[in-house]
Image (cartoon, rainbow, N blue to C red):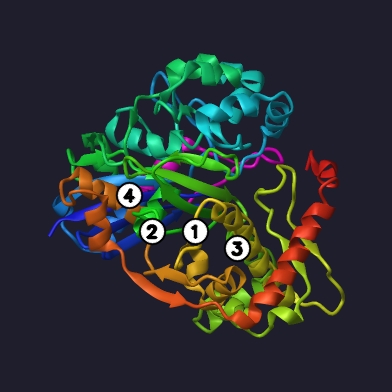
Amino acid sequence: MRYLVGIDNGGTFSKAAVFDEDGNQISVASVGTVTITPKPGYTERHMEQLWQVNAEAVRNAIAKSGIDPKQIAGVSFSGHGKGLYLVDQDGKPAYNGILSTDSRAWEYIEKWYKDGTNQKVYPKTYQEILVMQPVALLAWMKDHAPEVLQKTRYIFAVKDYIRYMLTGEAYAEYTDFTGANLVNLNTGAYDRELLELFGIGEVYEKLPPLRYSCDVCGHVTKKASLETGLPEGIPVAAGMFDVDACGIASGLADEEQMCMIAGTWSINEFIARSPVTNGSVALNSMFCIPGYYLVEESSPTSAGNMEWFIRNLMDYEKKEAEENKSSIYDITNEWIESIEPQDNSLIFLPFLNGSNEDPLAKGTFVGLTAYHTKKHMLRAVYEGIVFSHLTHVKKLLLNHGVPASIRLSGGAANSHVWVQIFADALQIPVDTVSDKELGAQGAAMAAGIAAGIYKDYQEAVERTVKITDRVLPRPEYKEIYEQKYAAYRGVIEGLGSAWRFFKNQ
């Protein structure tokens, strides 16, 4: 039996998982990453520390698996998209890594939409310009830290940096860079004119060669082997944007499927043979399966909001759960089930980490009275997250027939009551995928192709993807959720002029 290792770097954790050839998760190890917030809107991490965290996660996963490391056939990566990871001529970090929740560059987005830059770049990239994309962060860097750009040799996404540390070889990868306004989607290549439109033409020489997700991009070095426990010399595949990784690990391998990921980010997607060019969706990028495009609507508005609520408002309940040797999520699920949707009029805007409405929008409760308890507030958080996903899905459905079901992964997929809210609000059946680390699983599938275990992604899907459950929508809840969603939209529209007050907070 051969094994594959997938490494997944999200917004708060670095994870490594060991899988067998049939996609069974043998072990997983997760190590927290430290987020640095030097100013409001800034989210960074120490890159050298990030590498050490990744090495620790891999070592722990291999140790927990009980396998002989010599049986590991390949390794690959999944990671958060957007953000910015810069390396200098000596292979050292040129700056802190910047996460996908960073909003420091918001003024550049406003400028580019006011001066028509967005209209000029759209025929090349077919995507919106987002505050956390490398192009915005590089423009900010040019104006605020030009010495950093001067010493930068390579521009990476997070997974590219970890791969570089494993192999010593510098590459970029299509799923990340085509979703970052860095690549001309018509040609599949870097475009100096595109970069000039953003005012950052000088970074052209700092962009590494592009590779497909399952391409071999080097082999584990002796030094990296000693640090991680991975066998020296095994192939290292390019890896992919975590949206692609979770999609392919959910079985998103044909044009009929649609899937959602409810993690830190609200990810909503389908794949197509050509990009959607009518401006109705936020992002088009190349999918991990060559010849397909990922059509995506996303924002940092999902389950991270619920984790904030638990972390800041449920200390007593967490202690209670620990004493009872149960999970805090058992308590949250019980709370949500105790309140019918029509019995809670609170509205929550899930914009604690960013927004799909306005780059300056903030998380908001509307409708609080002395009657309401934490249970009502948490129910509003669950529903607000669902409504943000619903906003995205409605845009996608303008270009895609209503699917037979939507596949859901991420933290929310582990809560049956939350999945039921998704199904009731969408009025579409929701399939959940077996409980494992899907980002790492998608990475392992790419590693398996690179190592010759799978012929292609279709074979990898057939061998590894298992649907856990299907939750059907309840028609009797259709009207109440339509009313609540309308109220949610009304609150967003009503607060549209207020967000500028918070621009420096």
Identified by mark 2, the residue type is: Leu
Q: CA distance from mark 4 to mark 3?
A: 25 Å
Residue 45 in the magenta stretch? The answer is yes
Q: Nearer the viewer, mark 1 or mark 4?
A: 1
Residue picked out by circle 2? 438
Q: CA distance from mark 1 to mark 3?
A: 33 Å
Q: Residue at x 69, y 76 (%)?
A: 479
The crowd level at tag 2 (other Cα within 10 Å; few <14, some 14-19, many 20+) is: many
Position of 29 with respect to 357 (left or right) is: left
Q: Which of the 4 image quadrants contains residue 305? A: bottom right
Position of residue 343 measured from the top left corner of the image (x, y, whole percent) = 75, 82
Residue picked out by circle 3? 307
Residue picked out by circle 1? 401
Give whichever of discs 2 and 3 has the lower sequence position: 3
The crowd level at tag 4 (other Cα within 10 Å; few <14, some 14-19, many 20+) is: many
Q: Does dot 2 land on a helix, a strand or a loop?
A: helix
